[in-house]
Structures are given as C-alpha cells and as structure tokens.
Amino acid sequence: MNELSEFERQLAAGIEAIVGPRRPVDSMALARMAVSRAPIRTSMRSRVSTLIGRGPRALGRRHGDQNHVIWTRRNLMLLLAVVVTMALIGGAIGAGSGLLRLPAVVPPYLSPQPTSSPRTSPSASASVPAGPLGGGLIVAHDFQNQHDGPFNVFLIDAGSGDRTRLGTLPGLLGRAYAFQWSADRSHILIPDALGPMPALQAPTEAARRYTFICCKDLHGAGRWVLSPLGDRIAGVREDARGERALEIVILDVNGNGTVRLPLPTGVGAVGNGVSWAPDGSAVVIEGCRPCNGAGFGQRQSPVAHYHLFIVPTDGSPVRELLDDTGGGPGAPAWSPDGSSIAVVRLICDPGTVMPFCGGAPGVLETVQVANGAVKRMGNVGPADFAPVWSPDGRRIAYTDDTGLSVIGADGTGLTRLVGGEATHAQWSPDGSWILFRSGNSLRIVPSDGGESRLVGPYPGGAW
Amino acid sequence: MGAARRPLASAASVSVRVVYFAPALNRLLFAMHPCDMAVMTSNAMEEASALIASVAAGDEIAFASIVRLYHEDMRRVCVVVAGDEGIAEDAVAAAWSIAWRKLGGLRDPARLRPWLVSVAVNEARQLIRARQRRSLIEVAVIHVDEPRGGPDPGATISAIDLRNALARLDPRDRALIAMRYVAGFDATELALATGRSPSGTRARLARLLHRLERELRDE
C-alpha cells in the first residue's frame, strides 16, 4: 500500500475527475443544520439559538416559515395538477371514447396474430413435454456496455441456450429493463424504469407472437405491473414532487377502460409499485402515512408510519394493514393463494427513523390478508428486493447482500442457494429453477439447490 | 478543557475558539497518515480527545471545526458511493447529525476520520437503498451526463467506462475504492472504517483493483 501502481494512478485520476474538486465548506451552517436536525439533546435549543443570535422561539419560527414556503408551492403544484387532470378528462370526454382506449399501449404492428406460425408457440409449449427449461422462455436484453443502446431483446431457452431476437430497445442511461410476463405468457410488459418508455423497436417476425405492453407515461402514472391474468396493468400516480401517491390507475390492456382508485390522502410514495392479488380483485401497495420527509426537502416532520394498503379494484374502501414505525414494509408480494403478503421490513435502531435509520438489517415477514397477523420468517441482510413466491405458493425466494435464499412459506427449510452477489430473483414458471442477476449477467439455479449456471450477459430479464 | 462548556455568544469568542482548535485538529489530521503515525504525540492525542469531549459537551464551534476538516472527505467519498451529488450531500448532512449525537462515544481520536467517513457511507447506502426500492432495476447508479470531450490528461481510462465499472460494484466496494483513492486512507484507516482486518482490507482492495483493471483494460 505504499507506492501506487500505474493503474492505481490512472484510477485515482479517473475517480477524481468524476468527483470533481474540493469545494469550500460552510462549516458553521452545516454544523448548525446537523445540530438542529439531531434529536434534542439537553438544552440544545437554547444553545443553538444563542449561537445564531436569536431566541429559541425565533429559531422555531424560522423553520416554520420554510415549511410554509414549501407548503404553498406544493399547493400550487396540486392546483396545477388538478387543473391539468380536469383538462385531460374534459378533452377525453370531448373526443369521445376513442381516447380512453390504449392505442399507444399496444402498437398495432405488434398485435398478436394467433393464426400465424403454428410451430412451437411458447404459450403452447408448456404442454409439450420437451419444452424449454423451467417451463417457459426467458425474455431478456443485452447491454454491451452501451448506455444509449440499442439493446437487443431476446427470448432465451435457459436449457439449450437457444435464443431468438425479438427487436431492440433504446438505452436507459445504464439501467436495465424489468420485463414482466403475463400468466398465460402471451403478453410482455416493458415497464417504465425511467419515466416515458418507447415500444419495442424493429420487431422481428418472432415478436409477432407476443403482445408487448409498454407504458408511455400513461395517465401520469408509472411503475406499471401486469395483472396475473395479463388483462390489466396497474400503476401509481404520484404528485408532481413525487412525494405523495395519489391514486392507483388500472388500465385494461385491450383498451376497455380506465379505473382510477384514489388512495387515502397523505400516503407517501415509496416502494416499487403494486402487487396484484392472484385473482385480480385488488392490489397492495406500501406507503407511509404520516411520512417523514427528512432528507428529501422537508426537515421537520413526525415519525413515519408505514402501512400496506389493500386497494380493491371494484372501488371498495381501501384497507390499511400493518403499522410500522421502523423502515417500512418493503415491496410487498401477494401469495399465489391470496391469503398472505410477504414483505421485507427494515428494522431501525432505537431512536432512529427513516431515512436516517441506523443499522437496519431487515426481517422477512408474511402478513395475513384476513386479519393482518404478522409472522416473522427470519432475518434478512441489507440490499433487499421484494421477496418472490414460488408459483405453487409453498416457498419464498429472497435476495440480500449475502446471496439468494429460499424459505418455506411456513417459515421452515431456509436454504441458501447462492452466496455472493444475487439480485432480482424470479421463479421459473414450473418452479424448478430460479433466475437471478449477478453483476450484469443472468444466472439460474435449481430451486432445490445445486450449481448455478450462466444464462448470459443480460442485465435485465424475466422468466 | 472545562472552557468548552462555556456558552458562546459573541463573534469574538467564535474566532478565538476556531484559532484555538485548528492546530490540534491539523495535527490530528496529519497523524492519520501512516508515516506520521509516530508524530501523534501524547499531547496532540490529548488535545484531540479534549476536542471530541467538548463536542460531546455541546460545543458547536468545536463541532464546526471538525465539520470544516472532514466534510469534503465525506462528501467526495459519498459521491462515488451514491453516484449522485444530491444523495451524497443528504448522506453527509445526516452523518453530521449522527456525529453530533455520537461523537462523544469515540474514545480513540485516531478513529475520528475513518469513523466519520464510514457513518456517511452508511447513510449514503441507506439512501441508495431507499431509492432502489423506488425503481425496479438499475444497472448503473451513476448518471452519464459525460462531456464527450477529450479524456482528462491525467487519466487514460475512459470516464464512462470507469463510471460503469464503479456502478457495477457493490456500494461497499465503491466506498472502499473511494476511501482509498479519493480520501487517501491508508490500510489502518480503511480497516477502521470498514470493520475488517487491515490484511483483509488489503486483500479486498487488491481483488477490486484486479477486477477493475480487467474490466477497464478489456473495454
């Protein structure tokens, strides 16, 4: 660690160029802010106020004023959003029902053509004995170290490694697309990882067998999730600041209408989006109410309470499950039998709250939908993603910073399948394999344990 | 150092206090480097400990001196960890808040800088994690708004490749790289900041360097 090697020197210079030069520090202001944000220590208020030459009350007022300014601006934003929404609705009604259909969602050139190419249609392949490994093909895209693409989209048989190119997608500034298959494997959702999303481009003949649903910032909502039957997509519409989740928007994939399901006022927008009930009768979304916006512009606020909100799609009242004052219940995942919801909850150190929640490894839990009863399955390390149910609902896979693990739905039989980097676990349709991401590659591992195999250098994919 | 408990009201006492503490902190800062470790006299140690003690007793001026000395180290490391200036600043602000509360528990003044940086890195990781839960998949944490001009004269590594390579690392590994090459930590400090043994840290760093070199040379 004495002399820097040539590569180290280049690396240091490269990182230096990314980080930029040192800046002057207003240490008094930073110190004051830190002191004012810390939970009150003994007679802290009077000390701070002495320091900046105001009385304690003046200090409080100053912060109050800041909040007031933010609040007014937010009001304006809300007003604007309401006006725009009204205008949109008015326009839609004025133009007739045509606008409420979804021409942009399903590009006409990609509509499914059931009569064409009868050979080895993937939806039929599940019943063919020698089908693809895991009971279905993987849809994935390559990366090729390009930020701005184009990415090639493939269908891949994880067993043989055979792949069919479907078309291309534009780059996502280094991000990957998170595809979703519908249960009957006829629809592929390309969700909006970064806001407005384009459709599949330059589709090949093979792409004609599938319906690609893409979500070009529809109805101001995002984070779309395909329903288990593949007939609807559910997204979350947030306010202009991205702080509050306003409503769940459900669109019929075939253009048969839009359902808007308002959330209770004041629900904070957190999480990945919704998880569907297996029968499509409701969606569940996590959110805080009240929220602690500290760190995102709002400095003084109460302790956040996180909940799961169950939103019936028929417009029945929203139900609130859980009341968590820790780090929140992670991305919820509804079980295939509909009885429970798996979450990874973050546990904050005593006295700390999100987002300044110290320590905080998570716990994997299941929450009974009927009565909200919580069952703790085990501890989970940091870097969690949503837990995933096996297709038969008997096991749950989850990833944390130590690897990929599977645990029985009853909390027994914890098995570490993969150590090291593993994220974005997904079950194969027949439940015998688990697909996961390691670095910018996809790998698979038998769900009962065994050696993992490389699928290929694909950063994003779905089984 | 009982004077630290005295309430501070006037600007005059502010400047006096800063002047008083700066030498002790500078000595502390330099003592962090391995070659200077022997220079850390028992006297300087005492002064540094007293400084930490006065922060623990509620002395904001002493605290501001510490902020001035270490803020940029923390921020710059967090920029690499989070790949985002805004997250880095939020993380460091949160870290100072924690430091204000917990600095008093720091017994060994030689741990000050590694401890502060590791607190900031933890906060940055928490914030990245909060963001990760908001978007489904991110390959790169670092935005590429790269000027397409010529490469930096000091670096022959492409900046975009480097950003990509860093983005593919675990946040803790990015933190290790940043602490070494941005903040200039030595093996002892890296070990203190990461909670691993010095030899384990060296091995980890060597593996990371090997990986980065392979990726960057191939591209």
Image: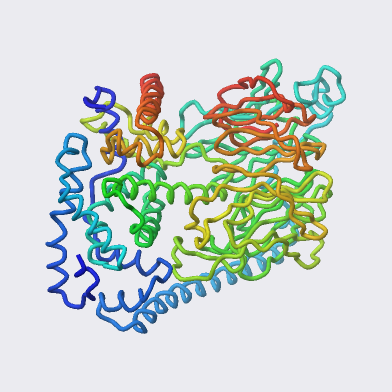
The location of residue A266, given as percent across then percent down, is 61, 69
At which x and y percent is residue B36?
Answer: 16, 38
Farthest residue to the front: give it.
B42
Residue drawn at (72%, 57%) of the image: A100
| A291 left or right, relative to B188 | right
Give residue A250's quadrant in the image: bottom right
Q: How is the image coloured?
A: rainbow
> Which quadrant of the view contains residue A438?
top right
Q: Quadrant of the N terminus of chain B?
A: bottom left
Left/right of residue A96 with respect to residue A379 in the rendered view: right
Left or right: A147 in relation to A248 = left
Relative vertical location of residue B122 with respect to residue B1 in this rendering, above or below: above
Q: Nearer the viewer, residue A124 or A134?
A: A134
Judging depth in this view, the residue of A174 and A385 nearest the camera is A385
Q: Residue furthest top?
A: A160
Q: Is B35 placed above or below A305 here? A: above
Residue B189 in the image, given as x and y percentages of width and height: 30, 39
Name the spot of residue A211 as percent of width and height, x first: 73, 37
Residue drawn at (27%, 78%) of the image: A50
Of residues B141 and A60, the one drawn nearer to the viewer in this rendering: A60
Vertical position of residue A305 compared to residue A148: above or below = below
